[in-house]
Image (cartoon, rainbow, N blue to C red):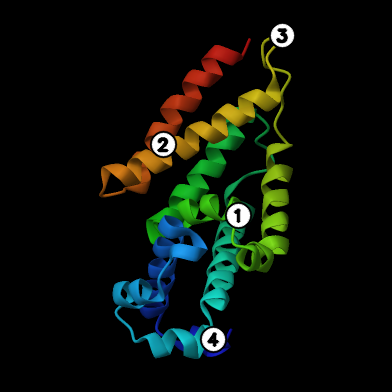
């Protein structure tokens, strides 16, 4: 990537990033069109290739950028003093919703990228994806699981939480006019209900 991209005005950077996030989140790497990206960003196609050289370069950049943005928020937004399983998960979702206010498609893109099937795209983000997933795992591992009812399977509950958050996110985008606060409020409702059902 051409580092001069960061010399652009922040508003223009964000237009390009948001257009790429949306295209890759909706179509995956294979079906995302650079024509759509430049149209949404209001720039020339030549500018994309000037800064990123290829579609793959742009994909790798927005993935690395997205994880960096979230990692910064995670580092400053989640206290190590919080050890309750559901409270930690809610804090992670609060961080994500904060990031989605500036980059609405950031989490949908990262979720889609987890299952990217185009080999060169999956390979380009592999190391960053593994590092990012480990960061999330390390935060979740702080969670105290001793409050769960006897017989409650912690891993299954974590899977339910992940699938619930993903389902809410996707449904909010299908409804149109996505608002990060609405997403977070609905996540809180579901996770608080799960807390009541699974805790002693």
Mark 1–mark 4 contact, CB under 8 Å?
A: no
Residue at (46% x, 51% y) in the render: 108
Q: CA distance from mark 3 to mark 4?
A: 55 Å
Give the residue number, with chain letter if any, for mark 4.
53
On residue 39, the disc is none
Label 1 packing within 10 angstroms: few (<14), some (14-19), many (20+):
few
Q: In the image, 27: left or right of 152?
A: left
Q: CA distance from mark 1 to mark 4?
A: 33 Å
Residue 101, image x and y in percent? Answer: 38, 56
Give the residue number, with chain letter if any, for mark 3.
150
- Sequence-first disc among 1 and 2: 1
Pick the residue in front: 166 or 31: 31
Q: CA distance from mark 1 to mark 2?
A: 25 Å
Residue at (56% x, 57% y) in the render: 70
Give the residue number, with chain letter if any, for mark 1.
76
Label 4 packing within 10 angstroms: few (<14), some (14-19), many (20+):
some
Q: Which quarter of the figure has residue 162?
A: top right
Mark 1–mark 3 contact, CB under 8 Å?
A: no
Q: Which quarter of the figure has residue 87?
A: top right
Q: CA distance from mark 1 to mark 3?
A: 34 Å
Q: In the image, 142: left or right of 89?
A: right
Residue 83, image x and y in percent? Answer: 68, 32
- Sequence-first disc among 2 and 3: 3
Give the residue number, with chain letter if any, for mark 2.
168
Residue 111, image x and y in percent? Answer: 53, 49
- Sequence-first disc among 1 and 3: 1
């Amino acid at each position: 990537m051409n580092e001069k991209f960061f010399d652009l005005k922040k508003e223009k950077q964000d237009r390009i990033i948001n257009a790429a996030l949306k295209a890759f989140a909706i179509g995956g790497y294979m079906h995302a069109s650079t024509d759509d990206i430049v149209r949404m960003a209001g720039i020339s196609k030549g500018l994309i290739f000037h800064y990123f050289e290829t579609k793959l370069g742009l994909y790798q950049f927005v993935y690395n950028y997205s994880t960096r943005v979230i990692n910064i928020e995670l580092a400053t937004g989640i206290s190590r003093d919080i050890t309750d399983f559901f409270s930690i998960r809610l804090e992670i979702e609060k961080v994500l919703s904060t990031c989605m206010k500036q980059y609405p498609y950031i989490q949908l893109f990262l979720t889609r990228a987890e299952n990217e099937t185009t080999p060169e795209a999956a390979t380009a983000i592999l190391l960053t994806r593994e590092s990012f997933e480990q960061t999330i795992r390390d935060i979740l591992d702080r969670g105290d699981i001793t409050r769960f009812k006897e017989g409650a399977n912690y891993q299954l509950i974590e899977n339910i939480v992940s699938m619930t958050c993903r389902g809410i996110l996707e449904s909010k985008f299908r409804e149109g006019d996505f608002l990060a606060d609405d997403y977070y409020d609905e996540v809180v409702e579901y996770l608080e209900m799960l807390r009541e059902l699974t805790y002693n």
